[in-house]
Image (spheres, rainbow, N blue to C red):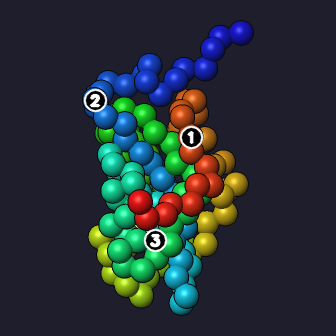
Amino acid sequence: SPTQPTCSGNFLYMNKRNVYLYLIKLSNKKEAFYKIGISVNKYSRFYQIMKFGYSCNIEYMMFGKNYLELLELEGKLHNIFSEKSYTPSVKFGGYTECYSNIDEKEYIKVLRELHPFQCEVIKNQQISWR
């Protein structure tokens, strides 16, 4: 049977660094919500948000080297989940990319329909200060 194409094998625009498309859960004593985003430096990005008093858990994150492809995929995900849009009480960079409730299984199903290639994935990882 033919092998499924991989992320790194199908890119027109290659980036030297990994690009991360993530679904994270952010919470504090007052609220909990999800954020869909893209970053070339995942931990630095998460620490920026955590400075506003949120704990951060990676629900699902895929990564590859095609920035433009993952940026387009991020935009499609924002459109699909737009009805669940949420405005956090603290406005940080990227606060408009937040959602009240995203079921991880639904998110993965949508993601695989939009991007059927195999990619490296990180799931359910709590981020803590260094």
Q: Which amino acid does label 3 sit on?
A: Cys
Residues at marks 3 and 1, CA–CA distance in whole angstroms: 21 Å
The reply to whether dot 3 and dot 2 touch (C-beta < 8 Å) is no
Q: Mark on residue 71?
A: none
Q: What crowding class fits label 3: few (fewer than 14 Cα within 10 Å), some (14-19), or many (20 or more)?
A: many
Residue 69 in view here: yes
Q: What residue type is labelled 2?
A: Lys
Instruction: Look at mark 2 in the image and give the residue it sits on.
Output: 16
Say which quadrant the C terminus sits in.
Answer: bottom left
* Residue 56 place in picture, x, y as percent: 50, 67
Q: Which of 63 and 45 is in front in this view?
A: 45
- The residue at the point 28 percent across, 31 percent down is 15
The reply to whether dot 2 and dot 1 touch (C-beta < 8 Å) is no
- The answer to whether residue 80 is left or right of residue 47 is right
Residues at marks 3 and 2, CA–CA distance in whole angstroms: 28 Å
Comparing marks 3 and 2, which lies closer to the viewer? 2
Comparing marks 3 and 1, which lies closer to the viewer? 1
**Helix, strand, or loop for circle 3?**
strand
**Helix, strand, or loop for circle 2?**
loop
Instruction: Look at mark 1 in the image and give the residue it sits on.
Output: 121
- The residue at the point 42 percent across, 80 percent down is 53
How many numbered callouts?
A: 3
- The residue at the point 43 percent across, 64 percent down is 129
Instruction: Look at mark 3 in the image and give the residue it sits on.
Output: 98
* Residue 45 place in picture, x, y as percent: 35, 59
Residue 57, above or below 85: above
Q: Nearer the viewer, residue 70 or 59?
A: 59
Q: Nearer the viewer, residue 81 or 27?
A: 27
Residue 9, above or below 126: above
Q: Which residue lies furthest to the top in this view?
A: 1
Residues at marks 2 and 1, CA–CA distance in whole angstroms: 18 Å
